[in-house]
Image (cartoon, coloured by chain):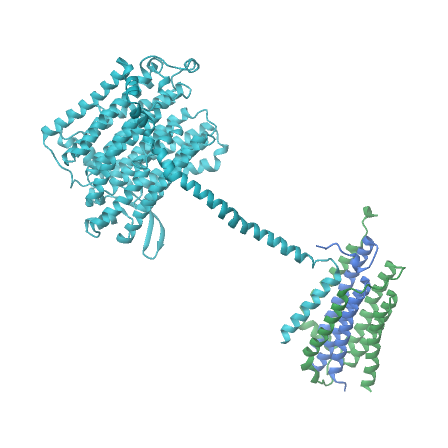
Chain colours: A cyan, B green, C blue
Amino acid sequence: MTEIFWLIPFIPAISTFVLVVFGRNLPKKYVSYQACLAVFASFIISVISFIGLLKTPHEHYPIVKNLFSWISSGNFDVSLSLQFDPLTAVMAMVVSGVGFIIHVYSVGYMAKDNGYTRYFTYLNLFTFAMLILVMASNLVLMFVGWEGVGLCSYLLIGFWYEKHSAANAGKKAFIVNRIGDAAFLLGIFFIFIHIGSGEFTAINEAISGGAITQGLATLIAILLFIGAIGKSAQIPLYVWLPDAMEGPTPVSALIHAATMVTAGVYMVARMNLLYAFSGTAALLVGVVGAVTAIFAATMALTQNDIKRVLAYSTISQIGYMFIACGVGAYAAGMFHLFTHAFFKSLLFLAAGSVMHALSGELNMQKMGGLRKYLPITYPTFLIGAIAIAGVPFFSGFFSKDAILTQAFAQRQYFIWALGITCAVLTAFYMFRIIFLTFYGKERLDPEVKKHIHESPRVMTIPLMILAFFSIVAGYIGLPVVIGEKLNWFRTFLKPVIPEAHEAHISMGMEWLLILISVAVAFIGIYIAYIFYIRSPQIPHNLVTRFPFVYKLLFNKYYVDEFYNAAFVNSTVKGSEIIYDHFDLKVIDGAVNGTATTTGFLGKILSYFQSGLIKDYAIVFLIGAILFLAYLLF
Amino acid sequence: MGIFIFFILAILCVGSVLGMIISKNQAHNALFLILAFASLGGLFGLLDAPFIAVVQIIIYAGAIMVLFLFVIMMVNVREGIPPEKKKWTLYLSLGLAVVLVIELIFAFKGAFSLTGGAMEKSGPTDLGRVLFTEYLYPFEITSVLIIAALVGAIVLIKRRKEEE
Amino acid sequence: MIPISYFLVLSILLFILGVAAFFIKRDLITMFMAVEVMLSAANLAFIALAKAANSIDGQIIVFFIITVAAAEATVGLAIILLVFRHKKSIKSEDIKLMKG
């Protein structure tokens, strides 16, 4: 049953091709059906392959299908080959499944947009690239997918390209990503030099066989991780993600919550042998993840734009995933990736539904008391918020708990403490959104209030589906305290992520940690309740009492301004200088000069064309003489 | 005796060409040329090429030059052509002609020493035999060429009704 | 016997006279006649060398040259007539349409 797995990326690819070539002439309804069904077909095949995978004995992992030998030059061989193993199965099902749901949602959200077909073309292209990324069996093909999703991110963020802010955001995303990608490429180069092949199976063999030193492993791991920092928006390359909210909301849900930004986590999990081998790199991953988690959470506290809060929240949650990888709990990181895909995309789509209801209003200060107007959006949003806050029995709880427990078990107490603090903040800012948006006094614009309406079914049904999964998705990874054998997710990933480095702690300790996580979540929710429902003057008081702190947080620690001053302005200035002196004068000069010279030569030669027969005859004569001379002498 | 005839014919030929150059009247030029062709025919005869000699006279002097005369009659330029302004192209071309002479002499250097015996077979029969065996292909092509020229000339010269 | 060299010299002389005539004369018809002179000079050379080489091929070639010259004269004169109809002049300087 697994033989067809290689079709998974190609169905969206064919759909993209059809849309690119014929899209202009196709009716909107057809485009919607084709785009959504293509992703759905991928999903079905993923599920079928997954079932087939379950039946295959572990020794056959990963199942590889070599499609095409791409580069073959001396010792350097790269082939287009796809593989299927548990890790890929998880990612493929998430990408195609959540992708399908978001495609359906987009049918409603983008219904009135002029660029409808273009949108679905890009979305399908993204799905294709992402699937290539997760199904590649070697680093180079993965990098192709990596770049592909970066491109689609640029295209989709700047979808409404007439808006300056959107176009700039797209550029920013691509450029910041590029910085990470440069390091990623260096990592790939080192791997080729020392291991000779980019195939994951070969790399893993080399590492377990001791073919590379720890120092080299650390270097490669760090370089690859820098790429992940760019792609997954960690410190210091996170600045593009908040700006990326300029794109349509379903794009934010798919790309910047569920799939693309998690590619970095996937990459680390895929290369887990490498990171485990080099302790330093793993530590770096964990520290960066932890610092980013806290840092982003603090910035989420003061933002007024719903999507921005969610963007910082994403950065923060991915920090959690990297914490997990850093302490060796790669499976826990993947588990959080899995649950996060559901509740974060749910949150984004629900926010989009709120915006749709309010004719595009994003500012929470202009909302309030919406729960009676949005009977479906409100509960689903609430479910998403509860899940992300880590309340028990919802999916977020199980995955967060798994991470924090492992962090503690590995004795990384500092990281654990940061994680717990971040959990408080997460609960707080999520419920701040809930209370500001759906409860309290209505601060709506009267114009907006006149048109308020719940979203159409094509948008609310995806919300409900995602809400359902946000609740139940956690149950496939129950913590050890409840049942040793019940962490089905962990067991499933064992062939790819060996259990070597995971530590164990006593039952009592684990229950204590669970209790702390739960307590922390409720503390956060309660504080938000006090701040925004009971005594809404508290936030205002705090702002006036600590204006400096508030300004710092509200302006995102002035990081963007710093980057602009330090890097961006000098680069722009430098390129302007080069443009004036080199591009205009030398290159244009050369091209124009060639044209002028040709014209000049032509003018000279035209003197010979007098039109008179005798002149031409003279030329004949000269030619004949010369020819004769050549023959004779 | 042969040399004597040769010199007479040669002087006649060169003389008529010179006359063609000097005379300004086109009809006179044509007549001079006919004389030149006739003497050339004689020279061909001296060279043991009787058939070609006759062909020369019939076709060149008889047909082509008559064609020229017809055209001269149709063009019918009454006023004479004023003398040429001496342009530098004239001198250049004459100089080049001198260069050409020298080159040609060089080219023919090797052949100057040749003397030929009398040719055994040069009559029409022999010519025909070779023409229709070895040179059959060019022969047929030439016939097509003649038809093409004929048709071409007629098409070119036909007045279209609207043109007048 | 007449040495071949005499004929060859005569041929060269006629050819040069033809070239000179072409450049000296100004009216198209006479220029065309000069071309015929050049062709005949070549014919003479061919026949002379045919005799020298004792091969009849030279005469065959001359046969073809004469034929082609006839065809060419036909078409050329037709063109000259057309030019005259158009420009009402047969001076070669007046035909300058291909200038530039």
The quadrant holding residue A43 is top left
Q: Is residue A262 placed above or below A306 in the rendered structure? A: below
Q: Is residue A142 placed above or below A431 in the rendered structure? A: below
The quadrant holding residue B13 is bottom right
The quadrant holding residue A183 is top left
Q: How many dots with numbers?
A: 0
Residue at the spot 65% in from the left edge and 73% down from the top edge: A629
Q: Position of residue A290 (x, y in %)?
A: 23, 34
Q: Is residue A599 placed above or below A29 in the rendered structure? A: below
Q: Is residue B74 placed above or below A216 in the rendered structure? A: below
Q: Report if residue A1 is visible in the image.
A: no
Q: Position of residue A611 (x, y in %)?
A: 73, 57
Query: Foreground: A470 or A368?
Result: A368
Q: Position of residue A186 (x, y in %)?
A: 31, 48
User: For the view shown, which residue lies furthest in the right direction?
Assistant: B78
| Left or right of B52, for residue A365 | left
Q: Position of residue A199 (x, y in %)?
A: 28, 48
Quadrant placement of the N terminus of chain A: top left
Q: Report if residue A96 is visible in the image.
A: yes
